[in-house]
Amino acid sequence: MLQRIQTVYIILASICSGCLSFLLPLWTVADASYFAVDFKVYIALFMVSALLSVVAVFKFKSRQTQFVLCRLNIILNLILLGLFVYRLLNLPGALEDAEKGIGLFLPVISIVLLVLANKAIKKDEALVKSVDRLR
C-alpha cells in the first residue's frame, strides 16, 4: 500500500537524492561553487540512490525486499558521505577557504529518512506477524 508512512519517508529520501543534488552546492572555494553535477561519480551515486528509493517504494507488497533495498541505499549514502569528506579534506586549502554547502548534508538527511522508513517497515512486519499468530 502506498499510503504507509514508510512510503513518505522513502519518497522524501528519493527527492533528497534525486532533485536536490542538482540544486544545492556541495562546497564553495574562492567564490566558485561546486555542485554534484560537476563530478560524474557523485551524480551517478545520487541517481543510483534515488533509483533504489523509487524501486523500494513500489516493492510495498514485499516488505522484506523493501527493507533490504533501504539498507542498500543507506550503505550507498554512507559511501557517498565518505567520498564527500575525503574530497573536502583533499581540496587545496581544504578547511581554511572552503565553505561547506548544504549539499554535503543530503546523504545524512537521506540516511535519517531511510532509517525511519526501515523502522516503520519493521513495525508493519511485526503487526502482520502478530495478526497471523491470532488466526
Image (tube, rainbow, N blue to C red):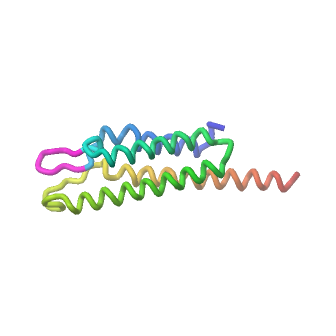
- Left or right position of 119 against 13: right
Q: List the single residue furthest toward the left.
A: 30
Nearest the eye: 135 or 36? 36
Residue at position x 30%, y 56% from top? 84
**Placement of 38 over or under 109, stated as above or below:** above
- Left or right position of 60 against 23: right
Q: Which residues are magenta?
A: 27-34
**Placement of 8 over or under 93, stated as above or below:** above
Residue at position x 39%, y 48% from top? 45
* Rendered location of residue 35, percent (x, y): 26, 43
Q: Is residue 2 magenta?
A: no
- Left or right position of 78 against 23: right
* Rendered location of residue 133, percent (x, y): 84, 56
- Left or right position of 63 against 106: right
Residue at position x 62%, y 37% from top? 3
Q: Main secondary structure of the magenta part?
A: strand
Can you say which quadrant of the picture contains the N terminus? top right
